[in-house]
Amino acid sequence: QVQLVESGGGLVQAGGSLRLSCAASGRTLSSYSMGWFRQAPGKEREFVTAINWSGGSTHYADSVKGRFTVFRDNAKNTVYLQMNSLKPEDTAVYYCAASYPGIAIGATMESYDDWGQGTQVTVSS
C-alpha cells in the first residue's frame, strides 16, 4: 500500500494560481497512473484529471481543461496539479489517488486504490 500526502492548498483570489503536490511513500509510483479528484461541500467527489505512469498521457474534466495541468516527477515519487485561472467554483478539497495495477488512465474513483487525505483549496470572488 502507498501513502499519499497532498500539499499546496490554500486561499486564493479568483484568477489566481496554486500548485498542489502529492508525495508518495511506501512504493514507487512510476508503474501506476495517478488521478486528482475534488469534493465541494454537499457534493459528490468528482474527477479532475489523471496522468499515466510515464506522464505521456493525460485526461482532464471539461470544467478544468485549459486551466489545470497535471504532471509528475517519478524520480521524486510526486505528482503535481498546476491550477491557473482559478474560479470560485473550483473551491473544494482536492485528493490525489494511485491507481490499481494495470489501469492505463482512469476517470472514475473505482480505478483507484490508494487515496490521500486531501488538501483544501478555497477561491474567493
Image (cartoon, rainbow, N blue to C red):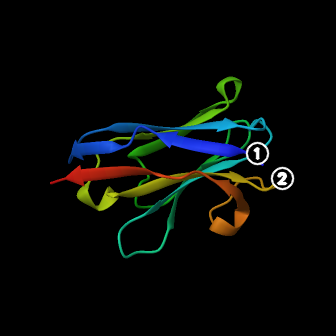
Say which label, 2 or 1, has the lower sequence index.
Answer: 1
Q: Quadrant of the C terminus?
A: bottom left
At a point 53% along the width and 52% down the height, the residue shown is 117
SS category of the residue bearing label 1: loop
| Residue at the spot 43% in from the left edge and 45% down from the top edge | 68
Residues at discs 2 and 1 in contact (Cβ within 8 Å):
yes
Amino acid residing under circle 1: Tyr
* Mark 2 neighbour density, 10 Å: few (under 14) some (14–19) many (20 or more): few
User: In the displayed structure, does residue 53 sit left or right of residue 82?
Assistant: right
Q: Position of residue 24 (x, y in %)?
A: 66, 37
Indicate the amino acid at tag 2: Pro
Q: Which residue is most to the right?
A: 102
Residue 23, numbered circle: none
Q: Is residue 125 left or right of residue 38?
A: left
Q: How many marks?
A: 2
How far across and down, in percent of the image, does residue 15 sit?
A: 22, 44
Q: Quadrant of residue 57?
A: top right
The residue nearer to you, when weighing 33 against 63, is 33
Q: Residue at x 62, y 62 (%)?
A: 107
**Residue 100 vs residue 107, the one in the foreground:** 100
Nearest the camera: 106 or 19?
19
- Numbered tag placed on residue 32 in the rendering: 1
Could you classify mark 1 by the number of other residues whose Cα lies within 10 Å: few (under 14), some (14-19), or many (20 or more)? many
Q: Is residue 92 above or below residue 52?
A: below
Q: Residue at x 65, y 25 (%)?
A: 76
Q: Which residue is mark 2?
A: 101
Depth check: give the residue in front, 98 or 116. Answer: 116
x, y percent for residue 113: 73, 58
Distance between the alpha carbons at the discs numbered 2 and 1: 6 Å
Left or right side of 119 for 84: left
Residue 75 location (% of width, % of height) = 70, 23
